[in-house]
Image (cartoon, rainbow, N blue to C red):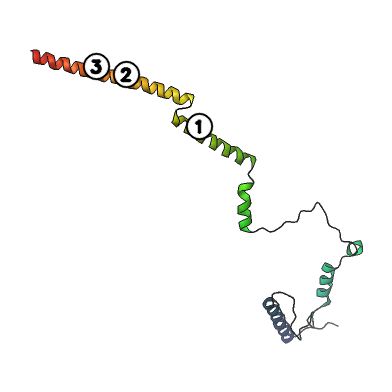
Amino acid sequence: MRTYTSPEEIDAQMKEEKERKETETESGGAGAQPDGVEEQLPGSGSEDSDDDEGSQKRGGVEGMIEIENPNRIVQKSKKVTQIEMDEPKTLSRREREELEKQKAKERYMKMHLAGKTDQAKADLARLAIVRKQREDAAKKKEEEKKRAAAGKAAK
């Protein structure tokens, strides 16, 4: 014969369960039970107790011996500040190579601006030749202007 729980009993059970959860959270989750509230609420089925026992107890040899798998990696939760601190220390090979390339390029540019590289020396030599040619051309123009002015004054 089946027995059914009345809606009033269900409401009472729900209220007790809410009160129990609230008191647990207020007490810091220490598992303190308020007086008058049982571990298992009245009217609840035996399925709840079987599930709880099955997760806590292990059958056979597992219940007797604690076995820890050395190959299993236990993931530890990290705080955001810890993750950010670890980032600069561990760089991948590609990231390291990219940083080295950037640093080498910066060093080359500094040396190039200082005129110490072969390319910079060649550029400076070409620049000196161009300046000299422009100076010579400017002198020739001045001389021609003087000759033209002297020719006009002589006429």
The x, y position of residue 122, in whole percent, is 44, 22
Q: Is residue 4 above or below residue 99?
A: below
User: Earlier along the polypeptide chain: callout 3 or callout 1?
Assistant: 1
Instruction: Calculate the distance from the C-alpha at mark 3 to the C-alpha at mark 2.
Output: 11 Å
- Identify residue for label 1: 108
Instruction: Calculate the distance from the C-alpha at mark 2 to the C-alpha at mark 1.
Output: 30 Å
- Identify residue for label 3: 140
The x, y position of residue 77, in whole percent, is 69, 59
**Residue at image x 36%, y 19%?**
129
Helix, strand or loop for disc 3: helix
Give amino acid for label 1. Answer: Tyr
Give amino acid for label 3. Answer: Lys
Helix, strand or loop for disc 2: helix
**Residue at image x 44%, y 24%?**
121
- Identify residue for label 2: 133
In this rendering, position of residue 58 left or right of residue 105: right
The x, y position of residue 83, in whole percent, is 63, 54
In this rendering, position of residue 18 left or right of residue 127: right
Specify few, some or many for label 3: CA neighbours under 10 Å numbering under 14, 14-19, or 20 or more: few
Q: Can you tell which quarter of the image residue 68 is in?
A: bottom right
Whether label 3 touches label 1, CB < 8 Å: no
